[in-house]
Structure formats: C-alpha cells, structure tokens
Amino acid sequence: MNVDIQSLGTFNQLAHEGAEEATRSMAQMTGIDAVVDVTKITLLNRDDVGEELTGREFVGVQFAFDGVLEGDTVLVFDADSAATIADALVPGDSPDEAMARSGVKEIGNIMMSGFIDGWADYVEATIDHSPPEYIEKSGADVLPDAPTDADHQQVFVFKSQIEWIDESVNFYIYMLPEYEPLAELMMEQADTEDDAIPIDKLQTFNEMTTKGTQKAADNVEMMTGIPTDAEVTQISFAPITDVPKQVGTETYVGTVVEFTGTPSGYLMVLFDEVSAVTVAEAMMPIEMEGDELTDQHTAAIEELGNIMTSGFVDGWANVLQTSVEHTPPRVVHDMGRAIVDPLAAQVGQHQEHAFIIESEMKTEDIEFESEILALPNEKELREALEALDVERANETQADVEQIFE
Amino acid sequence: MPDVLIADDSEFMRNLLREILEEDHQIVGEVENGVEAVEVFKEETPDLVMMDIVMPIRDGIEATDEIKSNNPDANVIMCTSVGQEEKMKEAVKAGADGYITKPFQKPSVIEAIEDVVPS
C-alpha cells in the first residue's frame, strides 16, 4: 500500500488548517489569543500514543467520527487552563461548576467540529461525529484508546499543538483515525506514484528503529552502568519549517553527525544539561567536583553520542545490506531549536516536508533522559524503503566472528 | 611487552584504551586520525594498532589499507562503534586482523588482542 509525499503533505495541511479553525473558534468565544504552533502526522506503536502527556492532569473533550474516515479525536488542555477557559466563558468569582463544564464541553465541540469539517470538505464527503464527551484524566488516559487492527501494531496520529500567546499553556488536538480507511483515503488522493512511500514498509522501518534505539540504550547502560530503557520510537511527518519546533526551547548537550548512504541526513543525540552531567560522570573513573559541565564531561558525551549513533543506524545498514557512513560527532550545547534549525535548513534545500525519526530513552532510578532525532533525506528514505526486504527486518545485528573467521 | 599504537579521535576513548592496555602493553603513540596513524606506524612499527574507523581527515579503514599494503605483517584491530556488516567486510578487505565494537569491556579487548598477538 503506497501513499505519495504530496498526500501526506496535504493531510498534514488539512490537520493544520483544522487546528487553526478550531483555534479561531476558541478565540471568538473566549478572547484567548492562541496560535497553532506545530502539526504533524506520526506513526508509532499503539501503546506509546500520548506518552508525552505523562505526569500531568488534563481535561479533554473527545468524540468519535465516522464516514470516509473513522476514529476518535480529542481536544486536550491542562486541567488548570480549563478553569481559565471556563472563567472566560462564564465570568464571575464563583462560576457554577456544572455550567463551567458545560461551557468547556461546548467550546470543545465547536472547536473539534471546525477541525473535522475541513477534512470532510476536502474529500467532498460527510464525516459524522458523536456528541462530545467531557473527561478529566491523568496523562495519556485523557486520550481515547488507539484504534486496534490485527494487521497493524502501529497507528497514525495527527497531533496539533496550540500555544496560548503570553501564557505558558499549550492545547493539543489529537486525531486517531482507523488505519485502513485513512490509508485508503491517502491512496485515493495520491496524484502520482513517483514519490510514493510504501507505508507498510514505513512500519517495518519504525520497528527496525525501535531495535536501534534499544541497542543505543544498551550501549548507554554498558558505558555508564545506568539501567536504560528505550521508550518511544516514532516517525513523524511535518513541514520543514516546523521541524525545529519538535525540540523544546530547553538547553541541550549532545552530538550531531551527518550520515551518508541510503538514507543520508543528520542525527542528533541530545541530553538535557542535568542528564548530560549525570551520564558523563557515570562514564568517568573519578568523581567530579561541582555540577558544571567541564571539558571532561563534554569529551565523555562526545564519545557516548558517537557510540549511540552507531547503535542507532547500524541496524538500518545491516537490514538494507548497505553501509551508512557518518562523520565524527560534533558536540553541541545550545537551545534545542537552535541546534535543529541549521540542520532543518540544510535538509530543506531539497524538500518541503521532512520525516523526523524520534526516539527517547530514560531510566527510573536517577534523573536521566536522552533523545535521538534523525532527519533523513526524504528521497533517499523513500529509496531505502523501496529496497527494504521485510523478511530481513530482524537482521539488525552483524556477526563479527563469522566475518573475521 | 607488545608495543601498541592507539588511533582514535576521541580523547575519552584513548584514555580508556590506555588504562585497559598500559599494564601489559607499551603504548608507543596516541593519534587522532588516519593520517597520523600511518605516520606514527612508520616511525614506531608497533606490534599492534588499535584503530578506530570514524575519524576526521582520514578514516581507519583507509589507514589500515595503507599500513597493511606496506607492512603485510602488521597487526591491526579495528576498535569502533560501527557494527555494520558491510563495514566489517571493508575492514577485512583492508587487511584488519580483528574487530571490536564499542562499548567494550577490558576482557573483550584483551581477548581480541590475544587472538591477534598471542602472548
């Protein structure tokens, strides 16, 4: 089953415009000034949907939809900002709680109807939806269950992040369509086969990348003694201009390499500053004084980034029976977006949209998190997917003893 | 005590290898790229080279190829984070005698050296 890049771009644009329509509706009703920050389509494991919401309380307004597309969609916002929205709707010192909920629910209804309507107009068909449901839940529980499909362990998620201007509050719109109707609709909208992506192979590639992330996590554990688990691995598709927004505005320490082969592109291994110091010190034989990042920390991060990079990309090369070369790592220490921006600009010279391969790893025992981001050349990723033999998907490890016999 | 040349662009990894090896080996040089590796090999003719692959200026496979072309009896162990089958085959073609993937621990390094340069 193939979809073309143009269709993915169109669908991403539909989700973005839907989110903008929803945001305009909210501004009209509440006076809250907000903008759609980023919209992306992500392919990830069903169990990982909403992982980024972990640890916070949310209010959600969700409904099911069916027609040419089937699935669920939900507007999510922090529990605290729900009170602000209610207050904007029903001003007063002590608004009636039931009235406030009803108001929030109606805002959600209007916003999400605006979100869905654009899709229906585009495909010139009807998409019906159920009455909205108001929910208060923690973390990913605020989202509807991802659609199940015996043939597909992974799901497509459309996610828009809406930023409340002048406030550090974000809203999110998630749309979780059923796999088959979405794939069929994308195929129907395809203009050409020239830039087609075989989406079933994209899933296989995602699975290979999950193994690569686990290998990188194993390498971290071996070098530091810190038990490290691969968490989420996903492939997202977004306009080039939105790529830097995938990384937060926090300061990161890490490495950047350019890789060449099939595919080529850039790969970043990023740690927040606290994690960088923690992981670097775990690699050193002597205890360091103070919690500042020294040259010794940086040297350790440089080598760890190098080893994690190899752990991540070697599996691609082995499955594809090719080699993926990479430059020596360059250490970076800057705001996340400032690190990604020049790399996105480089990739953007040849393409308007980008696939972003994102992986996270963390440990429960100490404060440690790391992200790996890959920005492959879209044309070469397509070629790699074309060449991918699904039967070889488990052949991520090379047998060095056999080769050097 | 065998003479060893360490070629790795990472200071951290050179330190680690030195700590692992210096008890039973003579470290005759530490270099950061393939060009320096070839030069120091000519000067010191060590018993063994621990050679990284991904290095600036000139990579470890090219350096190994030159060293082995001029000195077929030289012993070179690739010591790299790269775990790609095609790259391992390139290393074999260049004449590498062994291949260790990072991260490694002391026993695997000693075992690989013992395979190539028996004590």
Image (cartoon, helix red, strand yellow):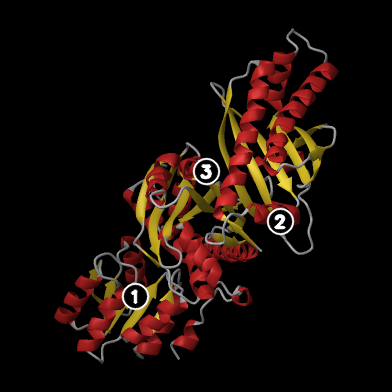
Label 3 secondary element:
helix
Residue A80 lies in quadrant: top right
- Chain letter, disc 1 residue: B
| Mark 1 and mark 2 residues within 8 Å of each other at the beta carbon | no
Q: Nearer the viewer, residue A264 or A49?
A: A264
Q: Nearer the viewer, residue A322 or A310?
A: A322
Q: Residues within 10 Å of mark 2 (few under 14, many from 20)?
A: some
- Which residue does the numbered mark 2 point to in the structure image? A184
Quick check: B36 above or below A172?
Answer: below
Residue at the (27%, 64%) spot, across then down: B56
Q: Residue B21 shows which numbered tag?
A: 1
Estimate the spatial distance between the alpha carbons at disc 1 and disc 2, rounded to whole Å: 60 Å
Height in image: A399 above or below A311?
Answer: below
- Residue A366 is at least partly visible in this image: no
Mark 3 or 2, closer to the camera: 2
Q: Amino acid at mark 2?
A: Glu
